[in-house]
Amino acid sequence: MPNKINFFIMSVFVATCIAPAFAEMDTSDFQSEPMMVAQTPDMGYTDDELDSLTADAVAAYNADGSLFQQITTLEQEKVLMQLEKERAQLDLELDRLAAEKIKLHMEIDTLSGRAEAQKQEIETEKAKLEAEAARLAREKERLQAQAEAASATAPVQVANEPIETDIDLGEKYRLVNVFGAGSQLQATVTDLQTGQNKRISVGKTLDGFTVKSISLYDGVEFIKDGMTQNLNISANR
């Protein structure tokens, strides 16, 4: 079958080459003399036999080394070179796609790593906040328990219990004298109920009152809860 195709292509090629030559010939030669038509003697072959003979002739034709074979070989080499070029281009494109795929996978891995790190940081921060909230809740419960315990143990004041009021030192004591010098001044007071004398100095206490100062002219100044009382000789009864 390939020999038949080669023969057909060679025939077309030969016809193509001969046609211009006939076109340039002078047709006057054909007009001056009658054209002789050769008649092929009838060999008595049928159409099937002629087809068979033609096929055998085509099969027996050897185109090796002919111009047609050279042209065919060049065309085949040209096609093969084009195919090789396209295949090389395709290989380059495949390599580029493979590199892009690797780069994409690396970017995906990087983003996944960042997302995992951020998730871990969020989880750590969440755990810290929960621990802090739990600590504050425990502290609140502790303070509440202390407040309840203090309320339970606080003394209850009886409504009819008399409230102690501060006494008037001037009604209970009398300043007898002041003696000493400078910051070493001392005073003597007498309890009006018992007649007992008591010696006092700065910083001492008398019935809950603290001696704030002693002066020869102003007497003794007492202080308690921010309130002051004085005992002096001129005010003695």
Image (cartoon, rainbow, N blue to C red):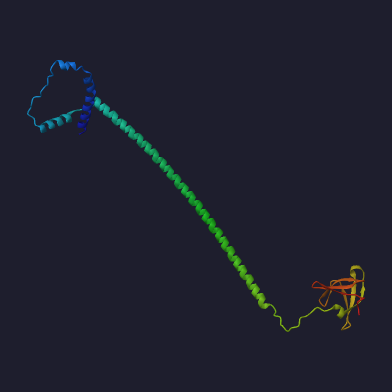
Say if residue 63 shows up in the picture: no
29 or 187: nearer the eye? Answer: 29
Quadrant in the rendering for residue 133: bottom right
Is 207 positioned to the left or the right of 234 in the image?
left
Q: What residue is at 22 percent from the left and 23 percent from the top? A: 19
The quadrant in which the C terminus is found is bottom right
How many numbered dots are placed on residues in this image?
A: 0
Is 58 positioned to the left or the right of 235 in the image?
left
Q: What residue is at 44 percent from the left and 45 percent from the top? A: 102
Q: x, y percentage for residue 214?
A: 89, 71
64 or 139: nearer the eye? Answer: 139
85 relative to 116, above or below? above
Q: x, y percentage for residue 112?
A: 48, 51
Q: What residue is at 44 percent from the left and 47 percent from the top? A: 105
The quadrant in which the N terminus is found is top left
154 relative to 72, above or below? below
184 relative to 8, above or below? below
Q: x, y percentage for residue 154?
A: 69, 77
Is 236 positioned to the left or the right of 151 in the image?
right
Quadrant in the rendering for residue 134: bottom right
Quadrant in the rendering for residue 206: bottom right
Say if residue 187 shows up in the picture: yes
212 or 120: nearer the eye? Answer: 212
Q: x, y percentage for residue 29?
A: 17, 16
